Image (cartoon, helix red, strand yellow):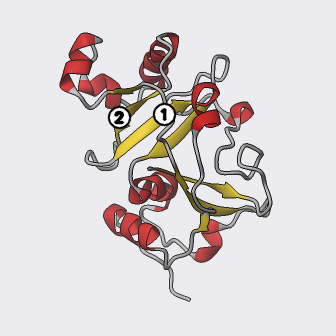
Amino acid sequence: MLYRVFPFRRGAAPTDEGGALHVPRTRQGSGRHDNPDLYGALYVARAPVSAVAERIQAFRGQPLADADLRRADGTHLALASIDDAGLGLIVDLDDPQVLLERSLRPSGVATLDRGVTQTMARALFAEGVAGFEWWSVLEASWGNLTLFAERSVGVLGLPAGPEPLTLGHPALRAAAQALGIRLARG
């Protein structure tokens, strides 16, 4: 099972804007593994806490309120559970042997230098894989994946509807605690 936090719009189809599997390619380009000229990057996580933490990390050092989970366009951040049983090959960049075979260093996988990470992602896309797994720079034990939308979205399932995030959601509370984010009261 994989997890994704996204701006949910009630009634949206899964691949439409506001849906759990929508990839906004026109807004991609500055992300860690973005190469919108080649593919859409669908960012997901192995654990709900990681998916939420990636989305709320900008609130470190300030309180997070329920209003911060809603957006001006009428969407609300939600957590989707995604069935990944049909996915093709996922390259595990947390496996030392895989890094050795590809002449990659852990520092090159985890760097914040987008020129390095986007080039790495471009090379993996050229191999024809469905995506790749790497560790979160927020917490190394959290596995994150970058899926190439054109090779993955059609085989992913949504076993349940998205869960709108609230300050009381267990994954949000765990992510806030892990990141030292204070939750606003009331």
- Name which residue lies at 50% across and 59% down: 56
Whether label 2 touches label 1, CB < 8 Å:
yes
- Secondary structure of the residue carrying numbered label 1: strand
- Name which residue lies at 43% across and 67% down: 171
Could you classify mark 2 by the number of other residues whose Cα lies within 10 Å: few (under 14), some (14-19), or many (20 or more)?
many
Q: Is residue 60 above or below residue 129?
A: below
Q: Is residue 150 above or below residue 165?
A: above
User: Closer to the N terminus: mark 2 or mark 1?
Assistant: 2
Name which residue type carries label 1.
Thr
From the viewer's side, name the closer residue of 95 and 180: 95
Compared across the picture, whether 97 is left or right of 114 comes to: left
Could you classify mark 1 by the number of other residues whose Cα lies within 10 Å: few (under 14), some (14-19), or many (20 or more)?
many
Q: Which residue is mark 1?
A: 146
Compared across the picture, whether 184 is left or right of 110 comes to: right
Name which residue type carries label 2.
Trp
Q: Which residue is mark 2?
A: 134
Q: Quadrant of the C terminus?
A: bottom right
Question: Residue 143: percent from the left, percent from the top?
Answer: 34, 43
